[in-house]
Image (cartoon, rainbow, N blue to C red):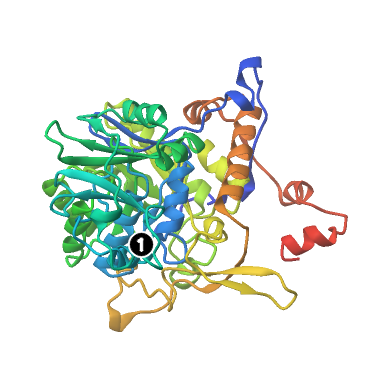
Amino acid sequence: MRILETESISLQELRLLPRHTPADAGMAHVSLRTRLCALGNGHLELGLPVLSAAMQAVSGPDLAIALAQLGGIGVLPLSQSIDAQCQAAAQVKRYKAGFQTDIVTLSPAQRLSEVVSLMRATGFATFPVTDTGLFHGRLLGVLTDKDFDPRGDGAARVADRMRKDVQVGVETHDLNAANQLMIDYGRGFLPIVSEAGTLLSVVFKKDRDKHLHHPDETVDSDRRLRIAAAVSTHPEDRERTEALLEQEVDVLVIDASDGHTAFQAEMIEWVKAIGDVPVVAGNVVTAEGFDFLADAGADAVKVGMGVGSGCTTQSLKATGRGQATALMDVAAARERRRQAGGRDLPLIADGGLAGPAAIVVALALGADSVMLGNLLARFSESPGQLVRGHRGELFKEYWMEGSKRAANTRRYAHATRDFFEEGVEGLVPHAGSIFDGVPVLERALRSALATAGCTTLRALHRGALLERQSPASLGDSAVHDLELAPTRAAASGG
């Protein structure tokens, strides 16, 4: 038995002190671009340092799509079937695909009544028509919902209503060139064909418009949104991993409450043997745990244990650590490794992030990005149901992966028969759309960096000056000595 003389502290106890802000380091000059994980000789980067937690209540495909559009990345939870997780990954990858190859095509002989059913089932309104009815057939024309009357043309054939005067791109492989062709043609849809007329891919104007509206979105080399997915260290999740790789998932995240285990090292080694996908490992809270995962070949490390808003691990098992102390210890280990010539692995703060202030402190202490659960679960795009309180206020359902509702036994190394809860379920205030809420968080982070005299997160790591605050100082910094206006009180649940 050994008791450390140091005291574990929370992110809430620290404040970032102002530093000199040069004229060219104001909020408008701040970049939040960051490293998510090592990838080959470089890094996979994010425009916004935010990941969604791998939780049922947080990371469905709708939120993952929205977060990637805003510059972050979603992590699909493993507490669902392999098919469901793969379908969610495919939904994200298809959402904005640049050159799309996964769309429905028609045969000229099909009846329009079948097309109406396809429109209802898929939500699509534009269909290429090929000689075989298959995607890589010879392009004959295009049929849209404006080319026929679904109430009176049901018995007609596709060939009777399709448009044959289709403007195309021939062997066009540059997305900018394809977009320019759409502008030149005044069309919102551009088939790409081979010299022989075979349909190769399709480009939609709406995809271009989405990119213009979200210039920092997280996309792969084919301009598809990136997605991460969680797997466990258990042997049965090797099948899950292989299925996710077939869906071209961009990052695998090992979902475990304790990452300092032989099972985690075995899983990293196995994944690296079957593919070149980056692996985010964790969670750890000590320098020893970080070194263990770095030696095992992890491409990024998650930091945090027992500090989630609904996590009961510390109160039940007395295992865990204050998030500020955990980050300082792990970041120091990373720096020692870097100076010794080792890999400079990105760190992801996971837990204890109650709001923008805690997030900026975590980033200042060495985190390259943060994984958010509670804050993202509040948005309309999260999977939780809306619930109305007794005073008419709106909440979203929120439950931990260690709760009875989620029963994510693999994350907490429980056998099903030995399961006990390490988390609770409850409600969080509804905060509207993520497209309204996350930009506010982004502005707060930019402003904080500017006040610290830093224009990048790497500069914040090197130049941040933090101070531990007394309880009285923290009290002074909170709203005090006034009654909140009714609208403000309702919004805060007060």
Q: Quadrant of the C terminus?
A: bottom right
Give the structural element (helix, strand or loop) at label 1: helix
| Residue 397 seen in the figure | yes
User: In the rendered view, would you say 254 is above or below 316?
Assistant: above
Count of labels in the image: 1
Q: Position of residue 275 (x, y in %)?
A: 15, 46
Name the residue: 17% across, 55% down: 133
- As drawn, is 1 to the left or to the right of 238? right
- As drawn, is 69 to the left or to the right of 484? left
Q: Position of residue 207 (x, y in %)?
A: 40, 41
Q: Nearer the viewer, residue 378 or 201?
A: 201
Farthest-out residue, right: 482
Q: Nearer the viewer, residue 171 or 437?
A: 171
User: In the rendered view, would you say 412 is above or below 416?
Assistant: above
Q: Position of residue 16 (x, y in %)?
A: 63, 36
Q: Position of residue 65 (x, y in %)?
A: 42, 51
Q: Nearer the viewer, residue 319 or 412?
A: 412
Instruction: Count neighbours of disc 1 (C-alpha within 10 A) and say few if under 14, some if 14 to 19, many if 20 or more.
Output: some
- As drawn, is 38 to the left or to the right of 477? left
| Residue 254 seen in the figure | no
- As drawn, is 343 to the left or to the right of 134? right
| Amino acid type for the residue under numbered disc 1 | Met
Q: Quadrant of the N terminus?
A: bottom left
Residue 18 sits in quarter: top right
**Residue highlighted by disc 1:** 119
Farthest-out residue, top: 23
